Amino acid sequence: MMRLRLFFILMFWALPGLVIAQSSMTASIDPNIVEVGQTLRYEVTIATKSNGDMALTTLPDFGEARVLQRTQSPRFVNINGISTRSISYIWAIQPQTKGRFEIAGVEGKVGDEILRAPSVSYQVVDPGNSPKTTRNEQAWVESEIDPPRQVYVGEQLSLHYHLYLDVRLRDVQPMPPDEPPLDEFWVEDLSSQLNSRQVVSAGSRRVNKIALRSYALFPLRAGRTTIEPLELPLVQSSFFRREEVRIKSEPLEIDVLPLPPGAPTSFYEGNVGEWNLDVSVDTRTAKVGDTIRLRITARGNGLPTKLRLPDFPQIPKLRALDSNESHKKEVRNLKIYGEKRVEIPLLLLEEGRVEIPSMTWSFFNPEKATYETLETQPILLSVAPGTLPPSAKAPQEVRESTLSSTSNKAEEMVNELLGQLKPADEAASSQVSLADNLVWRLALTLLSLISLLLLFEPFARRWWEKGEPLRRKKARQKELIAALQTATSWDDLSHTVGELLVEILETNRAALSTHRIIKTLETSASFDSNDAQIIAEVLKVCEEKRFAPDKSTDSTFQRLHSEAKSIFAKFAIAALAFGLVPQEARAEAPSGHHQMAIASAEDRDWGKARLEIERAWVQDPWDSSTRSNQETIAKIVRLNTIQSTRVGRVLEGHDDQLFWWRAFMSFGENSLPAALLGALGMLVALLLLARKRPAFRPFILAPILMILAIVALWTAKSWVETSVAPVIITKDKVEFRSGPTPHASVRGDVKGYSAGTMLRSMEERGDWVKISIGEDSAWTLKSNVEFVTE
């Protein structure tokens, strides 16, 4: 009995807390962009599951906007025995002036509980400048910007996208959205921080509010920036059909303010946010020759990767060794927080009292719109007598002499390695494995084809009959190309080129008119844009010569005739040749790349040398001369990097995907096709033998497994070739940035990459390419790199 009484007493005291937790107050405005004189709707809703009276205690302040109407709408809902009461206060207001306005949150109450609605903002523009709405009554996408005011360069701007779906819609599935480009911002993804789904009120209707995307944006430059709409496909499926509808958000205009003038001398452009600075050492007592660690740490709200901490001053009794930078980020309440730390080892040179002076550091606080300067306390060290290591006793001139001798030694090593380069003609006489022997490949291919034809002779005959029109077409094209070689007049040239284009493009002469020819050729896969321009010029000059003979000379005919022959000769090699084209006939053959690599190495152009030798290796990975020169040039690149950066290692080849790229590319261009044909030939031979001798049947499984393995390997190789794109840095002193824009901050922490270094590209955007650097990445201009494979 006493326990029952205690239970009711506890419930009596807990009931008010439960009631309080079940009340809420919201505010919304629609639309959030209007023209001067248009009407918008401001709505405040109080909802509760208690029995307390609901009412507004303060009224909204609309400033200069006119209030046209005010209404209120009570609502009562009972779901599964749980009752919810709400009341909505709705104002129709009419803005009178353009600008961005904010309606402060109003207060209300439920019984004795005080509630407060959030602030909302809207923008008023000139007539005719409001964006066209893409919202419908059942599904729409809304974007939300925080803060609603103008922001400064480097200040966080939160952008959230939500999908609103009428609760009565059934079988509607949102697909992944097409996200807008955000090139003008440093972007951090906050999507995992949003409440994925909730039911809210939209006027008199109930809708599902579904989180789509959320970003923390840090503007990289000042000015007005437009964020394009986010587009979302919605799929509604039924038993008989599947229908897709695309909806999108409104475009957003963001005004980014430059940082105000008058910045302190200790300010750096990336220091934006609200920060604290701490300077500490791991110990204040040590002896001469010891190394202590100084830590400079900034913590706070903002983007830590863009911070620049104060430089360590020169102190006579200390020597600063190589520093180490680190940073970490976290998200709290949809805000980016983090810290950046610099650790500097300090070698103690003299005994006595050593003072590390105070450091001054400034940042811009966007909330207060002011620069703030922090100053640390000086640190006093007590250094006891001790012994310096021998390297620390060397005077400056001795160290410079050591570096000079190291440079001379490095140059001697480079010259020695250059002497190890093998000329490309040795590649032809170098020993090649049987798997890459062209005669062996052709013999195996011929054997496999004969076996297949014997087995599938009816199908082969039918295939041959179907291919007869194509063979006649190729024969006609070869005939016209031969006629082009012997053309001696403008009429011959015009007629032959025109007939060739009609045959190749499968079109009529009308499509070859002067105003349509370039577009027709550029849409064809047979000619590039440069060839299209030349062919158009040939036809144009031929037409002019026909009606105005004095406008062209014999030299013009010779030039255009030569260019036309060259273009169609390339077409003949690419499209009409039967079987393998000899390597000597291709300008991009391995021997050509090999010769270019050696010439570039002799000219000390390590970027070009590495690029050409890698391309030669891609085309013939089993050539011993190519592999030897590839290793030699890679050693020279590493040696140059170590010499220029004074670091003992080069961060190259650490990427796992580059390892797999090399592994799969080591299969020659024809290795897998030849192996597949060999396995097929073996399978056909065993099938024929098994017909007469059943004892061979168990062996049929072996070539089947080989075929499956080869197909799997071929598929993996194709995927790696298309997804992994290695690049070679072709310039010295390449600058890396944090984003794909010249306004992004320079990544000073990315070092050790000289001309010839091979890295993996991750993404291309305009003139920029994103490079993988360990677990991190950075952007650089495409002009600084070359892709190994196109």
Image (spheres, rainbow, N blue to C red):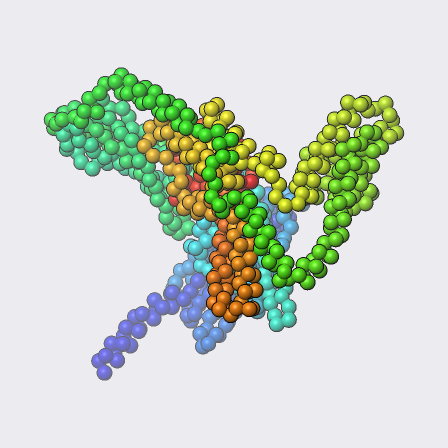
Which residue is at 69% across, 40% downward? 572
> Residue 423: horizontal and vertical position, in percent?
48, 29
Residue 344 visible (yes or no): yes
> Residue 630: horizontal and vertical position, in percent?
44, 35
- Is 254 displayed left or right of 749 in the figure? right
Which residue is at 37% across, 29% downward? 639
Viewer-nearest residue: 396 or 626: 626
Number of numbered discs on residues? 0
Image vertical order of residue 103 relative to residue 416, above or below: below
> Residue 394: horizontal and vertical position, in percent?
22, 20
Which residue is at 50% across, 43% downward? 725
Say which quarter of the image contains residue 354: top left
For the N terminus, the quadrant is bottom left
> Residue 273: horizontal and vertical position, in percent?
39, 39
Which residue is at 44% across, 74% downward? 82
Viewer-nearest residue: 421 or 721: 421
- Residue at the limit of the structure toward the front, as seen here: 692
Image vertical order of residue 714 relative to residue 302, above or below: below
Image vertical order of residue 628 relative to residue 449, above or below: above
- Is 269 displayed left or right of 482 in the figure? left
For the C terminus, the quadrant is top right
Viewer-nearest residue: 504 or 165: 504
- Is 682 displayed left or right of 294 in the figure? right
- Residue at the limit of the structure toward the bottom, as seen here: 1
- Residue at the limit of the structure toward the right, as seen here: 547
Viewer-nearest residue: 173 or 790: 790
Say which quarter of the image contains residue 575: top right
Residue 67 visible (yes or no): no
- Residue at the limit of the structure toward the top, as seen here: 397
Say which quarter of the image contains residue 773: top left
